[in-house]
Amino acid sequence: MRRCYSTKPIEDIEAELEQKGSEYWKYLLTKAMQDKSLDVLEHFVMTVSVDGAAPDDVGLIARTFPYLRVTHLGATDWLVTLNARTLVELWRDPRGRLFAEATVSELSQRGVCPVFNELAFGVKVGAS
Amino acid sequence: MRVKLLYHTDLGAIKRVLSQKGVPFDPDAMMDHVVYMFEIEDCSRVTTHQLVRHRAVSYDQESQRFSAATREGVVTPPSVQSNEVGFRAYDESLKVVYSAYEKMVAAGVPKEDARYILPSAIKTKLVMTLNARSLMHLVWQRTALQAQWEIRELASTLHRLAQESTPELWTKIIER
């Protein structure tokens, strides 16, 4: 997002982001969420291993959310790749909420992107 | 043009999950799960117009609404550079266009409106994220001899960076 509104070279932008720290990330993400500029979230992609999910349930979210990629690993196990925008859309849709909650919980437990989890899903930083 | 691989999926992590499940590594199936994020600088808008025709890719491009254009920031094709008459015509028209752009901005015309006059040769930068399947399709189409020189150069670089970062995936697919 920052890159699209600046003529500065990559290195300068990266140094600026590094220097300003998490508060600046928080500001940028808050603005993206408020402006509904969710396209910037598409660059954050995650792959999760899903165990114990029925084919019908996985099929429903795979059909409903076309940017979700699913590979069947056997029985009720799956490999699912999605971006943060799709995760937000899953969270907001009753058909995807359960999957989104499980994914956000996993991200939180692993300490992945705590600022985003707090802003997008209300997960408190530091909470288990 | 500068191209930087900002991120790619850790293929080793995916292979560990597959191994735990007793599932053999199938490069073709994994192409949907391996993702690359590139930053591209100093390519022309001619090329990015061609690039965005590739779907299932996330793009964020430098905004001309907010960033000012400069005369130095244009790409000149080799066929123009090597043609004396052609280059003179190219250079003269750019001078006229940029002079008009600068006058408009100085007179208070918003950059988002003054940009209507800017050429497709203008340099731009963007971030693009795509999976290996989409990248392979892009590389296949845009490294073909019929593709234009600039996007061919870009596609070749994307291919090289992807192959260097995840050699096993690309080698196995190419072997097939």
Image (cartoon, coloured by chain):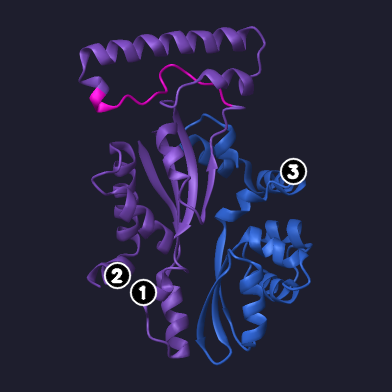
Chain colours: A blue, B purple
Alpha carbon separation for disc pair 1 and 2: 6 Å
Please tell me how crowded label 1 is: few (under 14), some (14-19), or many (20+) other residues with Cα within 10 Å.
Answer: some
- Circle 2 crowding by C-alpha within 10 Å: few under 14, some 14–19, many from 20: some
Chain name for mark 2: B
Single out the mark in the foreground, 3 or 2: 2
Q: Residue at x 41, y 68 (%)?
A: B31
| In the image, residue B74 lies in the stretch drawn in magenta | yes
Q: Residue under mark 3: which chain is it in?
A: A
Q: Earlier in the sequence, mark 1 or mark 2?
A: 1
Q: Residue at x 20, y 20 (%)?
A: B82
Q: Is residue B100 above or below residue A18?
A: above
- The answer as to whether the residues below labels 1 and 2 share one chain is yes
Q: Which mark is residue A35?
A: 3
Q: Label 1 marks which chain's residue?
A: B
Task: Indicate yes or no whether the magenta region holds residue B46.
Answer: no
Q: Main secondary structure of the magenta part?
A: loop
Residue found farthest to the front: B146
Which residue bears the numbered disc 1?
Answer: B27
Residue B173: mark in rendering: 2
Query: How far is mark 1 from mark 3, CA to CA?
Result: 39 Å
Residue B28 picture location, percent across and down: 37, 73
Residue B34 falls left or right of residue A76: left
Mark 2 secondary-structure assignment: helix
- CA separation, marks 3 and 2? 41 Å
Which quadrant would the N terminus of chain A be assigned to in this image?
top right
First to last magenta residue range:
B67-79
Residue at (72%, 72%) from the top-left corner? A96
Amino acid marked by disc 2: Ile
- Can residue A114 be seen here? The reply is yes
Give the amino acid type for the residue marked by disc 1 in the picture.
Pro
Residue contact between numbered discs 1 and 2, judged by CB atoms under 8 Å: yes
